[in-house]
């Protein structure tokens, strides 16, 4: 049975559209719509490009698909609208099944984990009129312990504070998370007036939510993300907001540190209380708040937690996966554990060569790019690495990556300033051979999806200063030979040549653009940035003199 799961919807406020094709309980293809529209987060777009890709990857037509599955179960007439949209774009629509947004999040993490039983924590901004759910999952049964009201939202809390600090909500929360490490949590007393824990519950002070205070003005869904969402009361508590692009002051860094710490306090109390009720110390995380890798680390390190699983798509692109899984479980299919995220498009040598010749590029055609790439890295070059199937999720995991020598202390500044064109405080991640990660990082956690930060040991700080954040942590990727042989071979060769058993890794894109999908986008990024070298499968391109 073929089933397609989709996310996003027919509304301007929806974002992170994606499509996933599963056959029985196995993923065949998955991708986010932004990789095809080239608009970050693909706001308001249903995933037409992603569906087309999934069908093409499987070699099937829409007539071969039994169900289209989606969240937004509470939206009136939504199933009919989706069916009409699919039929309009593809000539036919399978039967449409709708599910609760947060049950889709829960399915995407629990069934992907391979755990027989789990305490499942899903927290985000909102979806299907709630902001999260806590579950006890066992086998095919999911028992709801707690559902959070739409207005009582940790995602809204973090988005509101992101906006207060001069950044774009539902886009720049990860900037605030990175900034938090440069401050001290000196505003915790003030934040206790904004957000406070309460066992399995929490309380977000709704007097700071402008859409609630000004109900007469905001009579429709508050979803443009362009308007101010917090009241002036927030500034009475914390002081004047930061205007976009204004200088960052110590006060802003300390507010970021405090809001991050308060989130962690609330999440830890929720997790501990949930485990006390379920009796299960294996925890699965999903929802947009699940992208907060620092909070995930605090959960992982908590003594009440035995195992932690966070999928590569905890955000709204992941509800497409969860919707498909829920339908297949209903039909009696066991779901295969997800141990890698390489479910997107790949490109043949002929396709790449056609593009290179089309633009008149000067390139080398190598038998194996590994040896040449190691030499480039040894020269201090910053390298674009485009190999195999694109990653599903927001993290570059070695197939659409910018890589560099992590021992180069100047690499962070150069990549931020002249390649990514982004804030100087933004950190980079280490992709490390799984068999060596315990030599450099604490916690003994298999991290294939780069969704949890781990404490760095002194060996990491000494050998790879470019990938250790100011707070002595790093958001690592565990690289295994059985899930990404080419990337594992590259890191192994780099290590054999005298480097540490890891590489600096960040997404192959320019700031505010989606991670590249196709060769033409990679070429655009290469020629419009300070990258020294680009590898498109076995083809090597270099800037003059490289």
Image (cartoon, rainbow, N blue to C red):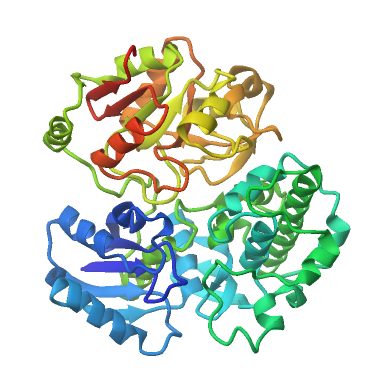
| Residue in the picture at 22% in, 25% down | 538
Number of dots carrying numbers: 0
Can you say whether 134 is above or below 422 in the image?
Answer: below
Q: Quadrant of the N terminus?
A: bottom left
| Residue in the picture at 55% in, 53% down | 291
- Work out whether residue 206 can be spotted: yes
Instruction: Indicate left or right for 391 with 274 as reference.
Output: left
- Asked whether 477 or 247 is in front, the reply is 247
Q: Position of residue 364 (x, y in %)?
A: 20, 19
Q: Position of residue 244 (x, y in %)?
A: 64, 53
Instruction: Indicate left or right for 254 with 288 as reference.
Output: right
| Residue in the picture at 68% in, 61% down | 271
- Asked whether 314 or 340 is in front, the reply is 314
| Residue in the picture at 42% in, 17% down | 377
Instruction: Indicate left or right for 379 with 230 as reference.
Output: left
- Work out whether residue 433 can be spotted: no
- Asked whether 354 or 31 is in front, the reply is 354
Q: Quadrant of the C terminus?
A: top left
- Asked whether 500 or 410 is in front, the reply is 410
Instruction: Indicate left or right for 461 with 340 as reference.
Output: right
Can you say whether 340 is above or below 101 in the image?
Answer: above
Q: Quadrant of residue 301?
A: top right
Can you say whether 465 is above or below 496 in the image?
Answer: below
Q: Position of residue 17 (x, y in %)?
A: 38, 64
Q: Position of residue 331 (x, y in %)?
A: 29, 74
């Amino acid at each position: 049975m073929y089933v397609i799961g989709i996310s996003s919807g027919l509304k301007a406020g929806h974002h992170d559209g994606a499509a996933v094709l599963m056959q029985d309980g196995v993923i065949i293809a998955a991708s986010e719509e932004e990789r095809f529209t080239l608009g970050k987060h693909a706001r308001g777009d249903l995933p037409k490009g992603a569906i087309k890709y999934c069908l093409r990857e499987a070699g099937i037509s829409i007539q071969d698909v039994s169900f289209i599955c989606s969240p937004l179960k509470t939206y009136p007439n939504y199933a009919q609208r989706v069916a009409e949209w699919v039929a309009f774009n593809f000539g036919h629509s399978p039967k449409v099944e709708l599910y609760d947004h947060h049950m889709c999040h829960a399915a995407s993490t629990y069934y992907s984990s391979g755990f027989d039983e789990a305490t499942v924590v899903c927290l985000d901004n909102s979806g299907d009129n709630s902001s999260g759910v806590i579950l006890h999952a066992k086998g095919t049964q999911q028992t709801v312990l707690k559902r959070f009201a739409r207005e009582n939202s940790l995602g809204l809390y973090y988005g509101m504070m992101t906006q207060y600090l001069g950044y774009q909500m539902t886009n720049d929360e990860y900037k605030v998370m990175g900034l938090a490490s440069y401050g001290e949590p000196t505003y915790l007393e003030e934040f206790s007036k904004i957000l406070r824990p309460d066992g399995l519950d929490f309380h977000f002070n709704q007097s700071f939510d402008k859409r609630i205070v000004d109900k007469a003005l905001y009579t429709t869904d508050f979803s443009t993300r362009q308007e101010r969402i917090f009241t002036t009361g927030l500034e009475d508590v914390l002081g004047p907001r930061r205007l976009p692009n204004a200088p960052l002051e110590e006060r802003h860094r300390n507010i970021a540190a405090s809001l991050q710490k308060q989130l962690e306090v609330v999440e830890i109390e929720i997790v501990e209380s949930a485990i006390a009720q379920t009796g299960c110390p294996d925890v699965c995380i999903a929802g947009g708040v699940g992208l907060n890798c620092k909070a995930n680390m605090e959960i992982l390190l908590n003594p009440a937690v035995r195992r932690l699983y966070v999928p590569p798509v905890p955000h709204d692109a992941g509800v497409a996966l969860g919707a498909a899984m829920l339908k297949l479980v209903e039909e009696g299919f066991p779901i295969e554990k997800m141990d890698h995220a390489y479910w997107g498009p790949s490109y043949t040598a002929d396709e790449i060569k056609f593009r290179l010749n089309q633009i008149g590029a000067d390139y080398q055609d190598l038998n194996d790019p590994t040896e040449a790439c190691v030499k480039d890295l040894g020269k201090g070059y910053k390298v674009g690495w485009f190999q195999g199937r694109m990653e599903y999720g927001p993290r570059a995991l070695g197939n659409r990556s910018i890589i560099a020598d992590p021992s180069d202390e100047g690499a962070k500044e150069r990549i931020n300033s002249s390649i990514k064109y982004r804030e100087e405080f933004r950190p980079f991640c280490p992709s490390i051979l799984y068999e060596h990660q315990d030599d450099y990082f604490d916690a003994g956690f298999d991290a294939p999806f780069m969704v949890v930060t781990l404490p760095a040991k002194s060996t990491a700080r000494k050998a790879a200063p470019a990938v250790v954040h100011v707070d002595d942590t790093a958001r690592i990727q565990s690289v295994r030979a059985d899930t990404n042989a080419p990337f594992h071979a590259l890191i192994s060769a780099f290590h054999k040549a005298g480097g540490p058993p890891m590489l600096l890794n960040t997404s192959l894109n320019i700031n505010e653009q989606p991670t590249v999908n196709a060769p033409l986008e990679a070429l655009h990024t290469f020629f419009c940035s300070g990258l020294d070298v680009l590898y498109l499968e076995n083809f090597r391109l270099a800037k003059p003199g490289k």
